Image (spheres, rainbow, N blue to C red):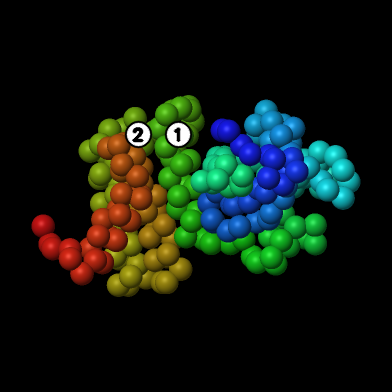
Amino acid sequence: MNLDFEKMNGLIPAIIQDNYTQKVLMLGFMNEEAYQKTLETGKVTFFSRTKNRLWTKGEESGNFLNVVDIKVDCDNDTLLIKANPVGPVCHTGADTCWGEENKQDIMFIKELQDFICKRYEEMPEGSYTTSLFKSGVNKMAQKVGEEAVEAVIEACNGTDERLIYEGADLIYHLIVLLTSKGYRIEDLARELKERHSSTWKRH
């Protein structure tokens, strides 16, 4: 990246965004040294204008911001950093510096997808997900069918609590099956989005 630190006297703003919830967590400033340290350590480091020194977020509280991705804007003078926060971000104890709650449960599905993809790449012994991958497509597909039937049974003759439980099992096993075929849950989301369009036609 060819960053322009000159526009603001050696500093550039860095917007921090939660990698999964997409919530904007905070805004800080970096000089070139802080930026390099962020790259080297994988933890967001700012230049503190009040302390007049480098400041790694979480160095005192332990609430680090672990870097996932860094993007630069079109003018090369602002950073967008996607990170996984360890604990609340704001010094007040709030999740974000705007007092917002950093929760969006639907986004956990993306996190789960990433986790399952990692299991597929690494295949660690003793993992239930690994055992599913090793069982083959037919067994995985059969498991999806079984979980679907169990969800239907709970919907018709069971309890709401068990319906949610079995529905979660169904989604998990479906993600495993999709992953084994080279797809992700986002591919289903894309298909549903296309169907929602007024121009979509049934295949």
Residue 81 visible to an observer of this rendering? no
Tell whether label 1 touches label 2 (CB within 8 Å). Answer: yes
Q: Nearer the viewer, residue 14 or 3?
A: 3
Q: Amino acid at mark 2?
A: Phe
Residue 127 seen in the current view: yes
Q: Residue at x 52, y 60 (%)?
A: 105
Q: Residue furthest right?
A: 51
Label 2: which secondary element? helix
Q: Position of residue 4 (x, y in %)?
A: 63, 39
Question: Would residue 29 be found to the left or right of residue 140 on screen?
Answer: right
Q: Earlier in the sequence, mark 2 or mark 1?
A: 1
**Location of residue 62 in the rendering, given as x and y in whole percent from the top left corner:** 78, 44
Q: Quadrant of the N terminus?
A: top right
Position of residue 73 relative to residue 107, above or below, is above
Observer-nearest of 119 and 64: 64
Q: Position of residue 27 (x, y in %)?
A: 69, 54
Q: Which residue is mark 1?
A: 119
